[in-house]
Image (cartoon, rainbow, N blue to C red):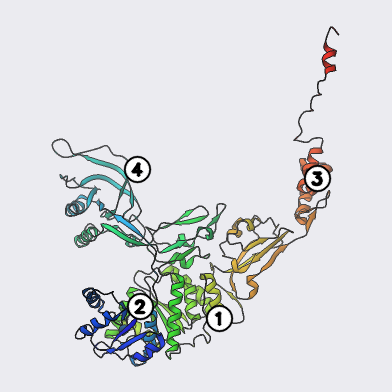
Amino acid sequence: MSKTLILCDCAGSQSIDAELISTACGAGCTRVFSALCTTGQEQAADLLQAGEAIMACGQEQAVFTALAEDLGVETPGFVDLRDRAGWSEQGEQAAPKMAALAAEALMPVPVTPAVDVLSEGVCLIAGPAHAVCDLAERLSGVLAVTALITEGDLPITRAYDVVTGKLVRVRGALGGFRLRIDGFRQVLPGGRGAFELTAPKDRAVSECDIVIDLTGGTPMVPAWEKREGYLRADPRDALAVERLAFEAAQLTGTFEKPLYVRLNESLCAHARAEQTGCSNCLDICPTGAITPAGDHVSIDPMVCAGCGACAALCPSTAITYEDPALATLLARMQILARTYRKAGGSAPRLLVHDAHGAEMIRLAARFGRGLPADVIPLELNVVSGFGHAEMLAGLAHGFASVSVLCGQRTEREALDRELALAVAIAGPGRLSLLDMTDPDALSEHLYMAEVKAPLADPVLPMGNRRQVTRLAAQALNPGGPVLPLPEAAPYGAVVVNTDACTLCLSCVSLCPSGALIDNPDMPQLNFQEDACLQCGICRTICPEQAITLEPRLDLSEAALGQRVLNEEEPFACIECGALFGVRSTVERIMEKLAGKHPMFAESAQARMIQMCDNCRVGAQFQATDNPFAAKERPRTVTTEDYFSRRKDH
């Protein structure tokens, strides 16, 4: 059954063209109602009972959800056409944008992979006695509390466990913390008077579901605000400690933890043969969820907070973001741009934002100018992972510009790098990061911004992030030029100093992407630029330091094929004529060793340098000083030998 869009003009405060929306987005629309959340609830009930519906209202979701529950029907979907389009100085011109937003809401939403996390309420509270004991007393009725007293007198209570020591390390997240405590001492409950303690013990290990840190020192985990189950406050701030009590009490039960990213270890270019190459994800991860694991990295899904910065910076697409997946995000952008043009719009602008940006848009719509009619908002859970591939894809889909509105907790470092890379490919004036907290300032900026003409013939970028980048860049730069890129870009060429290169092919054996290729038939180093990740392992491993990297993006077809970086004439074995090695290398070795090194002092020994492997082994066995030779085999004893030794014969 197809979904129906239920339209409401919010007490006549916005203009809605139901016919245009229905035609452009290809869905059935009701007539435009006026106050479905209040006086029109009976009409809303009839519409909900009629079949699958999407309410064109973002503000009153609770009302319509409760109404659906009372009626025993499926909860409707929701799309906000009012704050994002109708409430605007250009609201009369916002019909194409409404159609685009409605079409996006009709898309099926893939479910993000998730795993269940069980928290049984085992809680550790660490800090000075005056802050810890009161909180432990109140939480002991709902949680299994252990109070770790770092200073002060011990309480005389057995309502919760009491230990002393210093919390030195915290690993894990909600439902799976692992702690290390130095100077660990437990209470001995027997005897009269104050409790006594066991002997101190260092490197004690404990596990719990929830950690409340009232030590007042340095946080025990990086980006502690993003670590689920780790609660922290200044012990001197009574109000903050009180908030922790409420938060901790809610952290029991089974929770659904999204698996934000997926790792394909075989594509990872972190290291080869203990030579480190790419470390982008390790350097950018704010929570420390990513750690080295040999030639690749490892991601702890329980610690990952889902910022997406690692996926944005991963040059090999070994890490992909799943909330939403790239294909879903590209489909959303494509349907927004296509529907907007189909409804009569010409040059849409894309505004990417998170929940913080959504609130700014709502405030600007209610109290200010709202969004311009050509600015289409695209809400994501986080914008940190909206990298250069996504920015370029937006332009390729036909948006005149793409702006990313940063939130209060947005990880900016990755976005700054990705923006610089995207601008180098697309050119200036089309891509931007917006750092604004004032809704009126946001509206003013968008109304005053210069709007450039969008791509005349939009394309449909597909594939992984590298393929999307190449397709979008070719559409934005017709003719296939070679674009210079910033340092540390994931695209580029390998430049070889042929005078220094000996064609040892160490670089080929360690190249993680197969961009450097040998030729089994002759001494030759080939290169496929499209596959190069610019990880730098080849430059690191080269014994002659003959390799440098050139960040660039070659959009011509030549980048998809192999080209020769260095080649030389092979050397022919002086015995059998078989080709082996490199002529210049063999001649250089002869020049340095023949007649000079004790092992090659004689001409017969020096000749072995000019032999292939098989002939060299044969010559060595035939030599008089053969190191593999054994003693001469003894003569076989015969019957005559026995008779000759008999004395009676």
Q: Which residue is mark 3?
A: 606
Eye-nearest disc, 1 or 4: 1
Q: Earlier in the sequence, mark 3 or mark 2?
A: 2
Question: Is disc 1 in contact with disc 4, using a CB cutoff of under 8 Å?
Answer: no
Name the quadrant containing residue 363. Answer: bottom left
| Neighbour tally class for label 4: few under 14, some 14-19, many 20 plus, Cα within 10 Å | some
Mark 1 or mark 3: name the one nearer the start of the chain.
1
Question: Which label was assigned to residue 475?
Answer: 1
Which amino acid, by three-letter code, is at mark 2? Met
Mark toward the start of the polypeptide (1 vs 4): 4
Q: Residue 456 at x, y = what percent?
A: 52, 87
Residue type at mark 1 is Ala
Considering the numbered disc 2 on the image, is that residue within a helix, a strand or a loop?
Answer: loop
Residue at the farthest left position: 192
* Element type at mark 3: helix
Task: From the image, state whether disc 2 or disc 1 is nearer to you.
Answer: 1
What residue does disc 4 label?
Answer: 203
Task: Judge left or right: residue 255 versus residue 623.
Answer: left
Give the residue at x 55% y 81%: 475
Which residue is nearer to you in this view: 597 or 186? 186
